[in-house]
């Protein structure tokens, strides 16, 4: 199975793309011709071309001798006895998985998407390793109902630790991570609902301990549990976002990969601030915008209706918290559920950006219509497993 980034576009479109450009003119996007005078442009929240050969990312492992190899945006991933991720900045190795007799299979991830993965068994665990855009997603199913799972991370140099329990990052310097672990979620026995999990890093003499916390903040009972976390080497983004929440009013979540928009017992009321890097759109300013939609993978089907509120005042994705949040402005629409995504219509926003020749825009806030409804779990722009996609349909006048 050849699974590329185009599969992600096909899922949100609901049909295959045709006439895709073959030359990379922007690291974040793919352009395809829908009709004689219409184009569809797809911007991903992270780059979608590999630095090694300038080709679109292909989510497939290659079996070479005793190891499995995958190339992401700038990460070379090698899976042998351990999982090793390397780029020009450094190297990191995930240990304690005890990888034995791994094989490449095509299977569904815990969210129901068909993907290629490495599969192996380890005592009471069944483990799947999926390629992401710049690292790996580790999905573990186990009958051992422990509340925490500990791994070791070895690096070729020292970094300082940054995190908030949703993510844990090894930082080169302020606002510049080398690697980010995101604790995503675990599934309940019925398989159709997910709850957040947590992760922490602790420095050791010869590396770091990675702790995946499965028990907080609620106890879990069942015959088995499946959970997933990601390890990615950090890259630039074309979409900037962060969540803010009432339960943790001073917390910033700039590197977190999940949002629970609405109300939940975990985070209280949560909003998602998001804005597009307007500089990425500059060469589209001579086209007419038919429509523009932001697609965020929907992991859990809460019943919360989500408003799209325009922002007029700039905000910082690294400094925004519930206590310091920038207040929203006019209501521009309501997000919808389509093809397994939460979809926000940003047509007015993108038209304004292009009309102003790429001047920065303050973006929008996705917030619940009614805080008494259950939150919708979606991917943020820091999600390398299911990155956000901005679809812009253009007409050639």
Image (cartoon, rainbow, N blue to C red):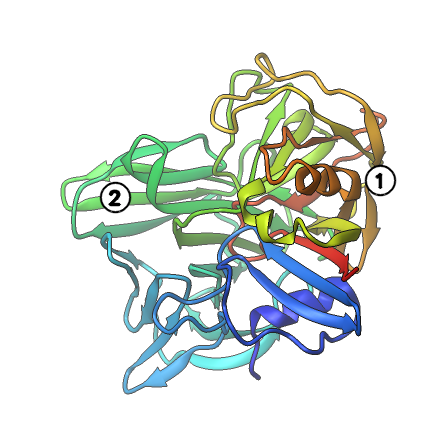
Q: Horizontal and vertical percent for residue 150?
A: 36, 48
Q: Nearer the viewer, residue 202 or 18?
A: 18
The answer to whether residue 87 is above or below residue 365 is below
**SS label for mark 1:** loop
Exactly how many numbered labels are in the figure? 2
Instruction: Verify CB contact (< 8 Å) between mark 1 and mark 2.
Output: no
Look at 81% across and 23% down and name the residue there.
Answer: 330
**Mark 1 neighbour density, 10 Å: few (under 14) some (14–19) many (20 or more):** few
The answer to whether residue 394 is above or below residue 265 is below
Considering every residue shown, the one lying at the far top of the view is 323
**SS label for mark 2:** strand
Look at 67% across and 36% down and name the residue there.
Answer: 260
Q: Horizontal and vertical percent for residue 247?
A: 62, 20
The answer to whether residue 290 is above or below residue 370 is below
**Position of 196 compared to 166: left or right?**
right
Look at 51% across and 59% down and name the residue there.
Answer: 26
Q: Is residue 304 visible?
A: yes
From mark 1 to mark 2, how far is it between C-alphas? 39 Å
Q: Is residue 190 visible?
A: no
Find residue 51 and report its image quarter.
Answer: bottom left
**Mark 2 neighbour density, 10 Å: few (under 14) some (14–19) many (20 or more):** many
Mark nearer the N terminus (1 vs 2):
2
Considering every residue shown, the one lying at the far bottom of the view is 65
> In the drawing, what numbered circle is on residue 316?
none
The N terminus: image quadrant: bottom right
Look at 28% across and 87% down and name the residue there.
Answer: 65
The C terminus: image quadrant: bottom right
Q: Horizontal and vertical percent for residue 77?
A: 34, 67
Q: Which residue is mark 2?
A: 208
**Position of 40 compared to 82: left or right?**
right
Q: Horizontal and vertical percent for residue 12?
A: 74, 62
Q: Which residue is mark 1?
A: 303
């Amino acid at each position: 199975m050849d699974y590329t980034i185009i599969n992600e576009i096909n899922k949100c479109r609901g049909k295959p793309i045709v006439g895709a450009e073959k030359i990379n003119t922007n690291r974040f996007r793919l352009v395809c011709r829908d009709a004689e005078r219409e184009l569809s442009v797809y911007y991903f929240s992270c780059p979608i071309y590999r630095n090694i050969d300038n080709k679109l990312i292909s989510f497939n492992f290659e079996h070479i001798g005793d190891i499995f190899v995958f190339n992401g945006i700038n990460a070379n991933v090698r899976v042998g006895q351990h999982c090793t991720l390397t780029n020009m900045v450094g190297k990191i190795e995930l240990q304690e998985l005890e990888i034995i007799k791994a094989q490449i299979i095509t299977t569904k991830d815990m969210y129901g998407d068909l993907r290629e993965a490495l599969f192996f068994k380890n005592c009471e665990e069944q483990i799947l390793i999926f390629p992401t855009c710049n690292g790996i997603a580790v999905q573990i199913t186990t009958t051992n109902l422990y509340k925490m799972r500990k791994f070791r991370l070895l690096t070729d140099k020292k970094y300082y630790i940054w995190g908030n329990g949703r993510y844990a990052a090894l930082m080169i310097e302020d606002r510049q991570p080398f690697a980010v672990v995101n604790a995503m979620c675990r599934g309940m026995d019925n398989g159709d609902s997910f709850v957040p999990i947590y992760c922490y890093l602790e420095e050791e003499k010869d590396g770091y301990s990675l702790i995946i916390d499965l028990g907080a903040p609620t106890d879990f009972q069942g015959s088995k549990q499946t959970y997933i976390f990601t390890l990615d080497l950090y890259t630039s983004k074309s979409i900037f976002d962060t969540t803010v929440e009432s339960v943790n009013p001073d917390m910033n979540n700039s590197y977190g990969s999940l949002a629970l928009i609405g109300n939940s017992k975990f985070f209280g009321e949560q909003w998602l601030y998001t804005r597009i890097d307007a500089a990425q759109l500059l060469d589209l300013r001579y086209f007419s915008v038919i429509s523009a939609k932001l697609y965020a993978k929907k992991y859990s089907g809460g019943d919360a209706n989500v408003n799209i509120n325009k922002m007029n005042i700039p905000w910082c994705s690294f400094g925004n918290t519930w206590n310091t949040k920038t207040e929203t402005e006019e209501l521009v629409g309501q997000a919808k559920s389509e093809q397994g995504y939460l979809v926000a219509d940003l047509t007015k926003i993108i038209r304004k950006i292009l009309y102003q020749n790429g001047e920065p825009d303050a973006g929008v806030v996705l917030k619940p219509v009614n805080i008494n409804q259950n939150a919708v779990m979606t991917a943020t722009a820091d999600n390398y497993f299911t990155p956000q996609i901005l679809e812009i349909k253009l007409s050639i006048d």
